[in-house]
Image: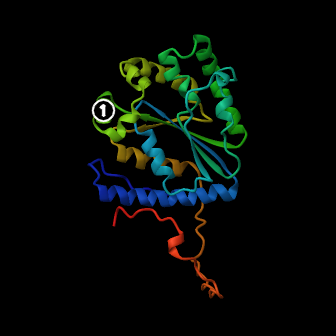
Amino acid sequence: MKVENISKKKMDQKSYEEALFKLQLELVKLQEWVRQEGLKVVVIFEGRDAAGKGSAIKRITQQLNPRVCRVVALPAPTEREKSQWYFQRYATHLPAAGEILLFDRSWYNRAGVERVMGFCTDEEYEEFLRSCPEFERMLVRSGIILIKYWFSISDEEQERRFQRRLEEPNKRWKLSPIDIESRSCWVEYSRAKDQMFAYTDIKQAPWYVVKSDVKRYARLNCIAHLLSMIPYRDLTPEPIELPKRKAGRGYVRPPLSDQNFVPEIYP
């Protein structure tokens, strides 16, 4: 897909929605290609808190079939899962043929929050850095298309978004106790990210950094790049002519008074 360069000036709502719709239409075409060709696609979304990963995922999935494109956002591991091979609970969600899987955070939790907040031992962390590249090479050899995005946000913009979450009741749920506790660990997270890249930015599955201080640009750039990573053809079917409805042949609808209706609070 050929994508026009987006102006660095602030994008107005109308221009943004038009650009987003065009990209979402291409995502539908990609989805049908993945389904027909039996491809297996895994896309990882990582980055700092409030970097816009979730909103980008929402725009990607907005027009797609949830039976083809799934989102996995795992909670903290249970005691049983903690005793398993580290990658085990992630591997069980990997796609079958004809599926796209989006990880809203992934096995890279070990190299980020677990490392910085002390939720794993030094030995577990070092084993992750050794194992992760081999695990991902194994996935790629198995036929999985693995794409990894890191959403990069400045300290100032992250602080602004945190403050908005405190002020707006509908966004306050996004601030978890861990988010608040890790707020003071900016430098530690930067070091952890740098080391993670040093070990896991491999040829078979490189990291792609999305500049996300401006959410609209981040979403559009991420979607455009995703579309460029998987060659696909337009499988849009020819226009369909709907057949005429058949006559009722004696069917009588039951009285409306027999049904329970939702109150019409809004006209």
Q: How is the image coloured?
A: rainbow
The image quarter in which residue 165 lies = top left
Query: Residue at position x 41%, y 50% from top?
Result: 220
Where is residue 252 drawn, in percent x and y?
Answer: 60, 83
* Residue sitting at the far front: 257
| x and y percentages locating residue 167 in the rendered image | 27, 35
Residue pushed farthest right? 142
Check the picture and name the quadrant holding the C terminus: bottom left
Residue 224 visible in the shown view: no
Q: Where, by quadrant of the figure, is residue 137 drawn? A: top right
Would residue 99 be visible to someone looking at this image? yes
* 230 up-or-down from 158: above or below: below
Give x and y (percent) for residue 242: 59, 81
Residue carrying label 1: 166
Residue at horizontal 51 percent and vertical 51 percent from the top: 61
**Residue shown at the point (56%, 60%) measured from the top left:** 29
Residue name at image x 44 percent, y 19 percent = 191
Question: What's under tag 1, amino acid-wise?
Answer: Leu
Residue closer to the observer: 206 or 170: 170
Residue closest to the eye, 170 or 256 = 256
Q: Is residue 54 above or below residue 196?
A: below
Task: State the SS at label 1.
Answer: helix
Q: Could you classify mark 1 by the number of other residues whose Cα lies within 10 Å: few (under 14), some (14-19), or many (20 or more)?
A: some
From the viewer's perspective, tell me whether residue 188 is left or right of residue 139: left
